[in-house]
Image (cartoon, coloured by chain):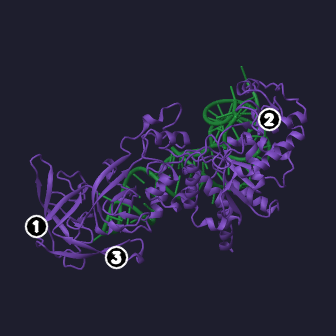
Chain colours: A purple, B green
Amino acid sequence: MANEQAETSAETEAVRRDFIRDKVKADLAAGVHARIVTRFPPEPNGYLHIGHAKSICLNFGIAREFGGVCNLRMDDTNPTKEEVEYVESIQADVDWLIDAWAKEVKSPTVLFASDYFEQMYGYAVDLVRKGLAFVCDLNAEDFAKTRGTTTVPGTDSPFRDRAVEENLDLLERMRNGEFPDGAKTLRAKIDMASPNIHLRDPALYRIRNAHHHRTGNSWCIYPTYDFAHCLEDSIEGITHSLCTLEFEVHRPLYDWILDHLDVPKPQPRQTEFARLSLNYTVMSKRKLLQLVKDGHVAGWDDPRMPTISAFRRRGVPASAIRDFCETAGVTRYKSQTDLALLEHSIRQTLNPIAPRRFGVLHPIKVVLTNYPEGKTEELEAGNNPEDPDAGTRPLVFGREIFIDQDDFAEIPPPKFHRLKPGGEVRLKFGYIIKCEEVVKDASGEIEELRCTYDPESKRGGATAGRKVKGTIHWVEAAGAVDAEVRLYDRLFRVPEPDAGDANFIESLNPESLAVTHAKLEPSLAALPLGECVQFERLGYFCRDRDSSTDRHVFNRTISLRDSWGRQGTSG
RNA sequence: UGGCCGAUGGUGUAACGGUAGCACUGCAGACUCUGACUCUGUAUGUCUAGGUUCGAAUCCUAGUCGGCCAGCCA
């Protein structure tokens, strides 16, 4: 009995996830819709970022959970800002992000608002016929002047009472290209005194003699967002139109347009949620574009960027981003999500699946003076302690190896568990070694460490059970693969780089990228692109696409949590 | 001197009139051939003031603070 109750309430809790899903569920229960249809409607004027990921996960996620579909629709109603490059990157990013969900819920083809231009124009004509829209000759400046302000009502356009026939004629001539850019607009006839400025006879069509990336030169008038978006939703049979909070004040107009047109019922309903805001980064397309154009980063997919393509290149699994979006939640409160939440999702996703490998980022050579010259042997190394099925791999061991600079200290700080003069550490999967001598060059730089090893301390050996404080990773010198390893840190030094009127460029973190010349275990030379491994004790890494057959470039996806060295430098 | 929206630990998010919970982060400890993982413990919260009610984070009123809106951008 008690168990049943617990299960029931747990189930209820699992289903109840946010206020939007509540609404969807209620609509379904009330029979408002037979099937849920959502949409993700990016404007192809930039690359998708982690903020879009939230919207993608929400829209596709809801469709999936409720057995519906989600359309990927390019909102391409402004030819002066949109490019094919962006529609392509958006498709690739969405496909990668939703991955297997695509088969279940994604509309089979990408949709384009521009495919509805003729239909939208027809609706505009309908509004004119009903006396609900008029052609206005005011230029942009006079339009603004007569709009009023937040506290002062606007005044009617002198063209507001044009006869229907004249409006029809003028609209057609607008379409036929008889007027220059900005000369005329089609406006809704609503209420210039409305406290909601978006209801003060808003523009529905504007003249743009511009080449559109899909419709070419067949149009010279283009619908505004407010007119186009609700119609796009209506045409596609969208049931729930989810958007961010800043569109809240547009909702009355969204409804007004559909209410006054002969469109299928039930009409789509717009619901707003708070966009994702992540600290230590910026999210606006304008600012991301500036970072790219001004060369502060290497491109849209520079792994320091918050773009989806950057996360992909950096080695972050799509499922980690989805997990993060779920963790961040959906509310109407404008929050600032901590980067730590994202990092946790990434580590949590990678830990059970990433094969363990050895990589030495900042090598110091170690010579084992009592290890026979010319001898090598194979050690058996576990691939992943989190996954019993991951198996083992052979690791060549020899007289000369590399260890990381961080794992040796000539003058060790308190509680230092690693190698120090006269001290011992275990080489993971191998022997216990003892540092006998520090060899330096003329300038005092450490040239190599001369150590002895305990031949019986290997797993299975007589002294294998000896306790030493530290276990470190290593790479055998002769077989080591040279690699360039790129260590990334947060792009900005401050949590809110674009707070207030701050110049976000000044907050860039000069140490967001550090490049090291590393020594890696041989198997890493063949690591396929797109696969993430853990360099033991260091973090998760993947091969970068800058690699070639004889050049190895790796990205650090994310470091391991480090309760010891946080005060030190990264890597 | 407008309209609309929002406010729960450091961060994010639950609780839908009935014991303020979870995750992240922080700190402390256990374990460890990864100073990881895992586990344990611990710290910190309902914006304010009234009201309704047996009972309010939740409902009402007012205030405070924050956000959005005056593109022919989306």
Q: Of tags 1 and 2, which is closer to the observer?
A: 2
In the rendering, which numbered label is found on residue A369? 1
Q: Which of marks 1 and 3 is nearer the N terminus?
A: 1
Distance, label 2 to label 3, CA atoms, is: 70 Å
In the drawing, does residue B62 fall left or right of residue A513?
Answer: right
Q: Which residue is drawn at 64% across and 61% down?
A: A61
* Amino acid bearing label 3: Thr
How much space separates mark 1 and mark 2, taking CA atoms?
A: 87 Å
Query: Mark 1 belongs to which subunit?
Result: A
Q: Are marks 1 and 2 in contact (CB under 8 Å)?
A: no
User: Where is residue A14 shown, x and y percent of the image?
Assistant: 64, 64
Q: Residue lying at the far left in this picture: please name it.
A: A442
Give the quarter of the image for residue A561: bottom left
Q: Which mark is residue A187?
A: 2
Left or right: residue A204 compared with residue B15: right
Residue at left offset 43%, top offset 34%: A506
Q: Residue A494's mark?
A: none
Q: What residue type is labelled 1?
A: Thr
Label 2: state its secondary structure: strand
Question: A498 and A341: which one is in front?
Answer: A498
The part of the image, by quadrant, that contains residue B65 is: top right
